[in-house]
Image (cartoon, coloured by chain):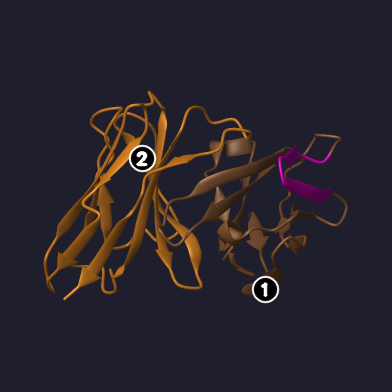
Amino acid sequence: DGGITQSPKYLFRKEGQNVTLSCEQNLNHDAMYWYRQDPGQGLRLIYYSQIVNDFQKGDIAEGYSVSREKKESFPLTVTSAQKNPTAFYLCASSIRRDRGDGYTFGSGTRLTVV
Amino acid sequence: AQKITQTQPGMFVQEKEAVTLDCTYDTSDQSYGLFWYKQPSSGEMIFLIYQGSYDEQNATEGRYSLNFQKARKSANLVISASQLGDSAMYFCAMREASGNTPLVFGKGTRLSVIA
């Protein structure tokens, strides 16, 4: 079955460490997105990519980096510059860029700083 | 810039009753899409319903319906005959047609269904 796989499900990071969250899709979707979710804040956009080798910053890109070398993969790196990285991270993809195309979401990664 | 407002942080509803979750939006585009997602405690995001700005009829999907009032810029979700499994976070989201913009989400409403 097609879908989006996020790994790991839980991730612990020490202060000053970079960590990378994986997001892989086999839906042949063009666009991929990363959102951060904090309690009471809803989903906030970190980065998104409409095509391979291209991506744009979202509302809260500082302290994060991404790459899109393959259509199927859109990994997110949380760098040491992100001062408050503890959150739930959701990856999503969509087939086109029309307004009616919703997202398929992964199951999320919960990142905790220890 | 587009914006979604959900003014109800939490709601309670009796099992088998109907409930309305509020959503208002702001956009300067004439063409846009509105979405509702459900997020159970497991964290997954489940698509519920979609309404296009040019759709003349309100969208319905089973027990879910969207009360779309374009002039008031509101897109309220109505859940009929609530079930215990409806207890979850509910997010309203919008996507403008121009500029290939990503979905913008509201802060969500936590719905609790009481037996």
Viewer-proximal residue among B11 and B13: B13
Q: Amino acid at mark 2?
A: Phe
Image hue for chain A: orange
Q: Amino acid at mark 1?
A: Phe
In the rendered structure, the answer to whether residue B46 lies left or right of residue A6 reads: right
Compared to residue A38, the image places residue A91 above or below, namely above
At horizontal 23% and vertical 60% (from top left) the residue drawn is A10
| Front position among marks 1 and 2 | 1
Disc 1 and disc 2 in contact, CB within 8 angstroms: no
Residue A84 x, y percent position in the rendering: 29, 74
Q: Which residues are magenta?
A: B58-69
Q: Residue furthest front?
A: B115
The secondary structure type at the circle numbered 2 is strand
Q: Mark 1 sits on what residue?
A: B12
Q: Which mark is residue B108?
A: none
Q: Check the picture and name the quadrant holding the C terminus of chain A.
A: bottom left
In the rendered structure, the answer to whether residue A21 lies left or right of residue B66 reads: left
Q: What is the spatial separation of the Cα atoms under label 1 and label 2, in whole angstroms? A: 41 Å
At horizontal 84% and vertical 49% (from top left) the residue drawn is B70
Residue B25 x, y percent position in the rendering: 71, 57
